[in-house]
Each structure stands twice: as C-alpha cells, then as structure tokens.
C-alpha cells in the first residue's frame, strides 16, 4: 500500500536485483522531457521584481511523496504543485543511487525532508532532502548493491522495472538493467544467519571479502583471500594445492577433521584434503566465534564460507590468461547467460587450467578445473540450482609443506629439493555435485532444500628427512605411500518466513540437516632404506625403497541437527537474534594394523548429543551506527574413552562478544570493532594419576580486539584493512604449563590492501595497488620451547581497465622475504612463498 516516500526520476536508478518502480506525476501534461531548455514564459520580465517572481515561479515544488510496494518491487511517486520535474543528474555512491533534481524545491507539509527505512525487499532506505542551490536530492540505498537502471522517454511516469500503463503521452521510464558490483563495500551476508541479512543487523563479527578484492589481489587460493581478515591465520597445508590448508581463527586451530570449518554456499564441505579452486568463487565470508547453532559440530574459532558464482540472466563472457615466473601459466574461461528465450534456464561454465614449476628443481604442478551449473526457474516462485565441480591437482616431485631448518632462524637453501624426488608425487581429485531447491509459498514464506556431495581421492608419495647432521646432511629419511578416499554427503531442509506480532516483526528460520562423512586410509612406510643427503652435493640417484604395509582404517562420522532462529525487530533501531540447535553425533572407526601385528580393532561406536544456544542484540542510535552484544556456544566431538570406558564429552566453546559497526562517507566506508572472550573446555590432557590415560580437564582461552575497515575512501581509492590483538593461552592442563600461548596464534596481526584507479583523463582506468601483511611472533609448539619470528610481507599491483579489456601485473612478496608461515615441530616449519609475479590479460563482454 502507499506510504510516504521519496524519490526523483533519474538516470541509472538502482534498487535491487529485481525490478522496482519509480513514478513521477506532474499536475499537467509535459510538453517535453528531453529538452533541457527553460520554461517558455508568455511574458518577458521587464523589472527586477518581475524577473525574481518568474524565477520563483519556475522552481518546481514537490508537495507530496508516496511510496507503494508492487508485484515488481517499489513505486515512488513525487507529487508536484505545478510544472514538470527537470531531468535529474545521477551517480552511485557506495550502495546508494543518488539523483539530484535541479531547479526544484521540496515543500512537504511535514517538513523539508523525507526518509523511510526498508520500504521494500532489496531497499534499505529512501531519502529525499533539499540541497543548496534549489536542488532536491533523492537517495535510494540498496540492501546488497546500489540500484541500477536506464532511462527512456515515453509517458508521464518514471518507472524502475516494468512499464506502468498511462494515458499520458510523454513520460520517463527507467528500466532496471542489473545489479551493480558491490566493490569494496559489501552490505549483507548469509553466513551468520542463513538469511540475507544486512551486516549492520548481525550481532556477531563477520567479514566479507568481495569479488572485486579477489580480482584486484589476483588471489589463487581461499587461504590467500582471507589474509585481509583480522584474527585469521593460515596454518598447515600443501603449497600449490588450492584449499589444502587449515586456519587458526581467534587463536583456535580449525583442525583437519571432517570439514575443518569449511563451508560452501552455507553447506558443510567436509574433508581437509578436498580441492577448492578460487576461480569458481564469487566472495568469501568469515564468521568469527562459535558457529554451531547453524552449522553443527565445529571448533569455536569460526568458519570460512565460500560463495560460488551463479548463472546469470544476461549473457556474460570472460576470457583471461595469466602468465608468471616459475613457468606459471593459467588460461581460464567464464561463460554465462540464458539457455531459453524466456530465461527459464540459465547456465554458467567456468573452466581453467593451471601449470607451474616450483622454486626447487624437479617440481611441476598442474591443476584442472571444470565447473558447470544450471538454474531452472520452474515458476515465478520456484527455482532449482544444480551444480557440478571437478578439480584435479597433480604434482611431480611434490613440495613438502614443511621445510627443515638449520636453527630457529635459518632455513635450508630455497632452491634445494630436500628429499628424493623420484619417490615423491601428489595426486588429488575432487568431484562436487549438488542442488538447491527454493519454493516461495507466498511473499513472506518459503522452503529451501539443499543437497551437496563431495567425493575425493588423495594419493601422496613422499621421501623426506626427519633430521639434520653437522648443518649439511639431511638424515633419518622416511618414505611413505598414502592413499585416502573420503566422501562427504550433506542434506538440509529449512523454512524461512516473516510475520508480525503486534508492532514487532519476526524473521523465522527452522530447519533440519544431516551429514555423513567417511574416510578410508591405507599407508605403506619405510624408515630405514634411504641414505642421508648432503645438501652441498646432493645425490638423488638412489634405489627405490621397499614400502611395507603399516596401517589401514575406515572412519565414519554422522550427525543430525535441528535448529530454530528468530530475528526480531522490536523497533526500527532495536533488533534481537535468538537461536538454538541440538546435535546428535556418532563416530565409528575400524583399525587394521596390517603391517605390524595384523590385528583388526573395532572401536565402540561413540555417540554424543548437545544443545548450542545463541542470543544477540543490536541497537542503532543513528542509521550509520550499530552497537551489538552476543553470547554463543559451540561443540565438537572429542573422540576417545576415559578410564571407566565412557566416551569423552564433546568439547565446548563459549563466547561473549561486544562490538560496533559504523558507516562513513555516506555509506562508502564501513568499519567493525569487536571485543571478545572465547573459552574452549573439555580438552583432553594426561591423567596425572595414570599418565597412559587422558582426562577432560584441559581448558584454553582467547581474548582479543579486532578492527576491520573496508570501502571507498574517495572516488577510485579503495581500501580493506584489519588489525587483531589475540591473547590465546592455556588456562588448565596437566602437562602444558598454564599461561602458555596457543600454537601459531600471534598476539598482533595487521593487514592493508589499497588500490587507486585514475577516474578521468588520458590515463583513465590505470590503477595501482599496495598490500602490507604483518604477522607477529608466534609459538612453535605447545611447550613454547621455540618461536616463529614476526614478518611483514609486501604485495603490489599495477592494472589497466578499459571497457571490456583488463590487464594487470600482480606481485606477491615483493621484497622476497624468507619467513616461517607455521610450524608442526621445531624441525618441520611451513615456509612462506617467495617472490611471485603474474601478468594477466582478459576480455569481459
């Protein structure tokens, strides 16, 4: 129904990803809206008084603003006392479409300004204000992106969306052309609530890395993408293989277990060893703090959710070629558009090939990615998305993730292959397929069903040293051949709806999910037959060792969960989030010690159940500021049995968080400041009465402050920056000293990535970028017996964009610093990647 609202007619109005309508009704027919000439007065002024009176009369007065939701979106009517509205001048500022109407005055009975919040889906705010110089400013702020439209002439109304029938002859029609790029200022995320909620309404720290940042930095893995997020540190993994890394979030390692906090489009993406190509990614969302209310059994630090690129309704073609040092070469294609004339079927196909040599001799890596997807619009209210993703990574003479060191501060020569290449290779294959089915029962209620399957095969052959003698001889070699096969199946169904209880509005989410993860492992080892390797004169020509059977196991993990969440708007500026989830967990493992004793051991099936709550509140004293506080809990299964034969209880995470979000520069710049207290309990530690057993008396705590800022400082100048202070310590343990810092968690971490693109002139489209990434000193082991030094890495970029053509040069580790990225032990330390330069050229049309 109609409600007071504001808005002018103007070119390029953007409202949302669906059609919206803006209509302007003058009181009499317009002779011409395409002519910018002044009104034709019947009598010329002969005195100053007459001249002033004619100027006053020429100003169009807006006397009423009416806003009405329609089937296609939003219609805004500006009522005038007399005369036609002049053609507006428009621009995009952050998520807002701004239209300035010259020679016009706002003369409303209730005052000289108008605003209305959330008048329709996809619109966060509509504002109309008087500006100096007889101008009226209309600002329409989109929830996810600024409105985008084009203007044509043909009637007496201004429409964003479908044309509205009119009996008048000369009108302005604005037709939505699409959704604008969110740039560096995303305004909404789905990870925190499983609904499309504005960031300003979420009572928990969440950071979004949009597509523009991924492209400007030319990141090659998700691990590189999250380097700009406060409180997130990359940990153990395999260089070159995208996705094979764990992360430390707010001091807690996400681990290797079924998923390790990895989500794909909000669904659990189980398996540390699964490939996750960056080319299919639209953006990355990082939710910090206990995630169990929506995602089940996970570590308390948080989750990383990868949002993939979806089929588009307009034709889109993107061809790129990257070439870099170390024989890096990567062609990639991204194609999308409709398959039918009525847009019933949409498609997207992303495919790429990547090859490179390593810094070390003998190393060559290849990655193939093919990812088709289909969107089937079954009706106006029913949509089916189906996808498949294939990725295959191979490495001849694969690089060990961890490098030996002479001492705490001195690595081996970077170009040295510290192993036996003839017995080292890596082959990983990942198949992902699934679908999401959405059906809207009405404008306020819908049901959503998703299924995701990930099938993975991981084959790893290695021959690497376990020690160093006399600072020159690598010794104690271990050779192995490992074969993992692991599969993850995830299904979910939930209902979403909005309703009101009196003056209070609710957005309800209720659902059920099921996850099945199984892993088969078979390992062959040899720790005696390989000779030492002299690093000054390496001899790699040695006989192949005989690998002997060592261990086989079959592991199965299953979970069921039900959850309920209510997002409550008590008023326009006071919001509450309440949610809870109950999980049923089971774990089963069959060991086959087929190498040593030939024994087969079936462990008892371990079952657990636990409830995880979350509550949060958001208060917005003004539109640009959100103050929030929250309490949340998480669980994760602790596998094993105590001295009484009872299964261990799940570990529990408990977090208290307060923070503030604010927007600057008319919404172009956003900042988030968070303070948190996070505790993990029920950690297993040695039983002081019987050291061969363990008890659940361990505890760890993380306290910290995080600051993130992102957006557009000035036209063409973008920034994304962060700082984190993390004090993560052991608070209870029978072996580790109380007060020890958790492994790999720096107390101080900061990042800055900024770009500037010239906006006008002969050099328009030329831009440059600079990145600084600082990680403070970290503890290398639980005993805190050695430390990893702090480091500051510098990245840079130079690019040119013109219409459909793009070219860029990206440099990672500009000054080629040699640094420790993480550690597994004093001898096995992950090494940062060296100087890398990649040139890119592409066409988008």
Image: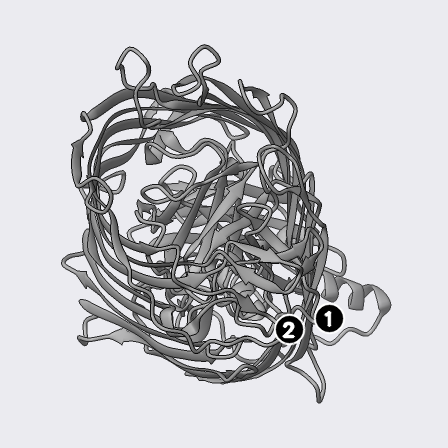
Q: Nearer the viewer, residue 121 or 252?
A: 252
Instruction: In the rendered view, tell whether residue 152 sits above or below residue 724.
Output: below
| Residue 444, quarter of picture | top left
Residue indicated by mark 1: 815
Say which element carries label 2: loop
Mark 1 and 2 residues: CB-CB less than 8 Å, in contact?
yes
Q: Which residue is mark 2?
A: 835
Q: With respect to residue 796, does 726 lie above or below?
A: above
Helix, strand or loop at disc 1?
loop
Q: Quadrant of residue 86?
A: bottom right
Mark 1 or mark 2: whose residue is earlier in sequence: 1
Quadrant of res 149: bottom left
Residue 615 seen anywhere in this rendered image of the structure: yes
Q: At 56% across and 42% down in the image, what residue appears?
A: 115
Q: CA distance from mark 1 to mark 2?
A: 7 Å
Coordinates of residue 9 in the picture (x, y in percent): 51, 63
């Amino acid at each position: 129904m109609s409600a007071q609202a504001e808005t002018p007619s103007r070119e390029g109005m953007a409202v949302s990803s669906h059609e919206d309508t803006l209509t302007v009704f003058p009181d009499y027919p317009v002779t011409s809206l395409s002519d910018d000439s002044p009104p034709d007065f019947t009598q010329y002024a002969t005195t100053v008084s007459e001249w002033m009176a004619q100027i006053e009369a020429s100003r169009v007065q807006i006397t009423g603003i009416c806003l009405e939701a329609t089937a296609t979106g939003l219609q805004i009517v500006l009522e005038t006392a007399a005369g036609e509205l002049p053609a507006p001048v428009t621009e995009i500022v952050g998520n807002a479409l701004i239209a300035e109407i010259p020679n016009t005055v706002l003369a409303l009975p209730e005052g000289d300004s108008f605003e209305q919040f959330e008048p329709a889906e996809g619109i966060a705010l509509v504002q109309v204000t008087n500006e100096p110089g007889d101008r009226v400013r209309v600002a329409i702020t989109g929830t996810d992106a600024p409105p985008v439209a084009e203007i044509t002439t043909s009637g007496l109304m201004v429409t964003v969306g479908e044309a509205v029938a009119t009996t008048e002859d000369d009108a302005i029609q604005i037709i939505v052309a699409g959704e604008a790029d969110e740039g560096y200022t995303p305004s909404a995320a789905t990870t925190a609530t499983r609904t499309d909620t504005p960031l300003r309404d979420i009572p928990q720290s969440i950071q979004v890395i949009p597509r523009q940042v991924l492209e400007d930095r030319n990141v090659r893995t998700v691990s590189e993408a999250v380097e700009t997020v406060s409180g997130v540190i990359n940990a153990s993994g395999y260089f070159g293989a995208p996705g094979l890394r764990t992360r430390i979030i707010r001091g807690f390692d996400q681990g290797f277990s079924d998923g390790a906090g990895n989500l794909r489009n909000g669904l659990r993406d189980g398996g540390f060893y699964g490939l996750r190509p960056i080319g299919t990614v639209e953006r990355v969302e990082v939710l910090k703090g206990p995630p169990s209310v929506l995602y089940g059994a996970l570590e308390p630090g948080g989750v990383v959710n990868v949002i993939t690129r979806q089929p588009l309704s307009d034709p889109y073609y993107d061809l790129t070629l990257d070439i870099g040092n170390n024989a890096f070469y990567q062609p990639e294609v991204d194609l999308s558009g409709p398959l039918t004339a009525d847009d019933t079927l949409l498609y997207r196909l992303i495919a790429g090939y990547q090859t490179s040599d390593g810094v070390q001799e003998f190393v060559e890596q290849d990655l193939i990615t093919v990812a088709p997807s289909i969107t089937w619009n079954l009706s106006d209210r029913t949509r089916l998305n189906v996808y498949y993703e294939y990725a295959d990574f191979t490495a001849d003479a694969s690089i060990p993730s961890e490098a030996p060191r002479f001492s705490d501060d001195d690595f081996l020569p970077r170009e040295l292959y510290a192993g036996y290449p003839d017995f080292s290779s890596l082959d990983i294959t990942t198949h992902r397929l699934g679908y999401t089915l959405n059906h809207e029962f009405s404008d306020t209620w819908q049901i959503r069903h998703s299924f995701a399957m990930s099938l993975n095969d991981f084959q790893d052959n290695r021959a690497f040293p376990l020690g160093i003698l006399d600072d020159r001889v690598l010794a104690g070699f271990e050779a192995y051949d490992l074969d993992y096969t692991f599969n993850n199946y995830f299904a979910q169904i939930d209902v979403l709806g909005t309703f009101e209880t009196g003056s209070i509005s609710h957005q309800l989410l209720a659902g059920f999910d099921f996850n099945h993860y199984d892993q088969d492992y078979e390992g062959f080892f040899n720790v005696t037959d390989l000779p030492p390797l002299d690093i000054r004169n390496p001899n790699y020509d040695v006989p192949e060792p005989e690998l002997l059977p060592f261990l086989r196991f079959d592991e199965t993990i299953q979970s069921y969960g039900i959850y309920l969440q209510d997002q409550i708007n008590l008023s326009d500026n006071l919001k509450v989030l309440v949610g809870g989830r109950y999980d049923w967990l089971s774990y089963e493992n069959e060991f086959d010690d087929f190498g040593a004793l030939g024994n087969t051991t079936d462990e008892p099936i371990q079952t657990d159940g636990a409830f995880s709550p979350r509550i949060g509140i958001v208060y917005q004293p003004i539109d640009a500021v959100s103050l929030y506080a929250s309490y949340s809990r998480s669980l994760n299964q602790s596998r094993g049995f105590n001295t009484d034969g009872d299964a261990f209880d799940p570990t529990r995470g408990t977090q208290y968080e307060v923070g503030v979000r604010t927007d600057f520069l008319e919404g172009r710049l956003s900042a988030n400041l968070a303070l948190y207290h996070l505790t993990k309990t029920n950690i297993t530690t040695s039983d002081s009465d019987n050291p061969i057993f363990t008890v659940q008396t361990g505890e760890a705590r993380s306290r910290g402050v995080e600051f993130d800022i992102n957006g557009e400082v000035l036209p063409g100048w973008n920034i994304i920056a962060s700082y984190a202070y993390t004090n993560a310590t052991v608070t209870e343990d029978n072996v580790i000293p109380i007060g020890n810092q958790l492994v790999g968690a720096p107390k101080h971490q900061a990042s800055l990535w900024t770009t500037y693109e010239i906006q006008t002139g002969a050099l328009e489209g030329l831009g440059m970028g600079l990145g600084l990434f600082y990680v403070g000193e970290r503890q290398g082991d639980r005993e805190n017996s050695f430390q990893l030094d702090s480091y500051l890495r510098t990245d840079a970029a130079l690019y040119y964009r013109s219409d459909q053509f793009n070219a860029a040069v990206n440099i990672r580790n500009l000054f080629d610093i040699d640094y420790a990225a993480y550690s597994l032990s004093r001898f096995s330390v992950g090494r940062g990647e060296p100087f890398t330069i990649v040139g890119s050229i592409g066409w988008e049309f």
